[in-house]
Amino acid sequence: MSDIILRGRVHKYGSNVNTDEIIPARWLNTTDPVILAQHCMEDIDKDFIENVKPKDIIVAENNFGCGSSREHAPLAIKAAGISAIIANSFARIFFRNAINIGLPILESPEAVKAIKNGDIVEINLNKGIINNTVTHKIYQSHSFPEFMQKIIKTGGLLEYIKK
Amino acid sequence: MESTITEKILAAHCGKKIVEPGEFIEPKVDISLLNDVTAPLAIKEFEKTKDGKVFDKNKIVLVMDHFTPNKDILSAEHVKLVREFSKKQKVKHYYEGGNAGVEHALLPEKGIVCPGDVVVGADSHTCTYGALGAFATGVGSTDIAAAMVTGKVWFKVPNSIKFVLTGKLNKWVSGKDIILYIIGLIGVDGALYSSMEFDGPVCKKLTMADRFTIANMAVEAGGKNGIFTPDEITEKYVSKRAQRRYKFYKSDKNCRYLKIIEVDCSKISLQVATPFLPSNTKAVVDIKRTYINQVVIGSCTNGRIEDLRIAAAIIKKGKKVNPNVRTLIIPATPKVYSEALEEGLLKIFVDAGAIVSAPTCGPCLGGHMGILASGEKCVSTTNRNFVGRMGHVESQLFLANPAVAAASAIKGYITIPDEI
């Protein structure tokens, strides 16, 4: 299998972006990813939905996705077109939800520190390499255990279990 | 090798002698929990599987508590979907309407979760059951969909942080103040991925209600689980409730901890978490005068009978809540409601001008039954005060214990019970 390369423009956020901000509970009366995406990040960045383009990348500091267990949060982000999230750290339920629904996430404090809002970043998902195409700086993130990589590649946990 | 209580429970559920922090495991799950917000997604995922049968209809719990009584048509459709699923799968534990209560108050009360269990729930506050000496943690809907198929869930064995609670509790100081104080100390990611084990002389005296409140908010420090060593107080609580056989585990004397943090509880005064993080904790007496528009006393954190008794003791007969403060009292379960009715607490609340609601998570997550307008401020006994958590993005939420909430409802600003 050839390496998966993701390339997109960065939307950068700070620490403790929580699931109430990613998708407020007032929209949890639906599970439709298209509707969820229309309200993604609206309580932290009301322009996000206007600005986001397919394949874009979210970069954030510590504890991204803290708070509720709502899987609607990574679903909304994925459906909004985001191809990957890079952060210093992820809250643990968000971490497993993202993997379970096949949304790539990477941890790299060095990359987070250096990457600026609007930079174009390229990620080699298999190798965990992050390339800031604006500064030409390369960062290596930790690689995930093989079974997590397989879950992401097959498109989610249920697909993985079926195999 | 010496193991922590969390490691022992996890090992026992994988058929292993020991498990070590960092190890990936797939333990068997005793109870998988879903609510009306997280169940529809899980059912959608579950239905992708071929044979479409749950692995064990007795080990799945569905509680319709978040947007219930159904707040709108979409929510009603969700509950209908879950109800039909539960009928088709003959799920033993389905709770709706007058049988439903806030899940993390309901499950221990009914003895559905027991000491020594591995419990997973598609709700972050599933960690509440650690108060019983169970390993309990929040996961996502897809995790539960998978657990409904296989009876298992994937985990990384967490490191453990031990909190040794010493000293003597000050007047009105409760489990809520202890956990808010700890979150303030270590931050909202201070225990990220770790198990928070509560120990020390203060723990041995804490009521089950206080233990539930403390374990409940472990997730607000990023913890995977919060856990207490079961003892006589646990035994007294579970022996008359447990629907299954249960087992008490305890940590070995010399087991490894990532950190051991001593907390002198004598230094803890009444706490309030100011907007917009549960870690923004301060002593109530140290904050400047803050007028409020709403008080909420309820939730999986502080909606138990003990909490309502405290609130009623402050509001008492003859007192009125401040006319500027909508005061919502939400008994967490039908049983709590019934007990509060029998004890005359609900009459005290209603006569004081408070609103008594049916059991629901409602306002805690900004669902319904008490949403805030822009600029409004609320003192709540719930667990999160994020931006927009209870309504408008420009509303503000202050987290406190039921005594502080009740006192603030009377005064109209955030204050301590001794002011009443």
Image: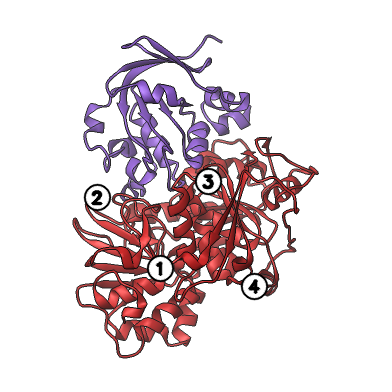
Chain colours: A purple, B red
Q: Position of residue B197 (x, y in %)?
A: 61, 54
B381 or B62: nearer the eye? B381
A40 or A44: nearer the eye? A44
Quadrant placement of the N terminus of chain A: top right
Q: Which residue is mark 1?
A: B270
Asked if A59 appears above or below B188 in the picture, the reply is above
Q: Quadrant of residue B26?
A: top right
Q: Which residue is mark 2?
A: B393
In the rendered structure, which disc, 2 or 3, sits on the residue that comes first in sequence? 3
Q: Amino acid at mark 3?
A: Ala
- What residue appears at the point 23 percent right and 27 percent down from the top-left corner? A51
- What residue appears at the point 46 percent right and 81 percent down from the top-left corner? B340
Mark 4: which secondary structure?
helix
- Please tell me the numbered disc located at residue B237: 4
Q: Is residue B198 left or right of B27 when viewed as pictured?
A: left
Q: Quadrant of residue A73?
A: top left
What is the distance, in whole Å, between disc 4 and disc 2 at their CAs? 40 Å
In the rendered structure, which disc, 4 or 3, sits on the residue that comes first in sequence? 3
Same chain under badges 4 and 2? The reply is yes
- What residue appears at the point 34 percent right and 18 percent down from the top-left corner? A8
In the rendered structure, which disc, 1 or 2, sits on the residue that comes first in sequence? 1
What is the distance, in whole Å, between disc 2 and disc 3 at their CAs? 27 Å
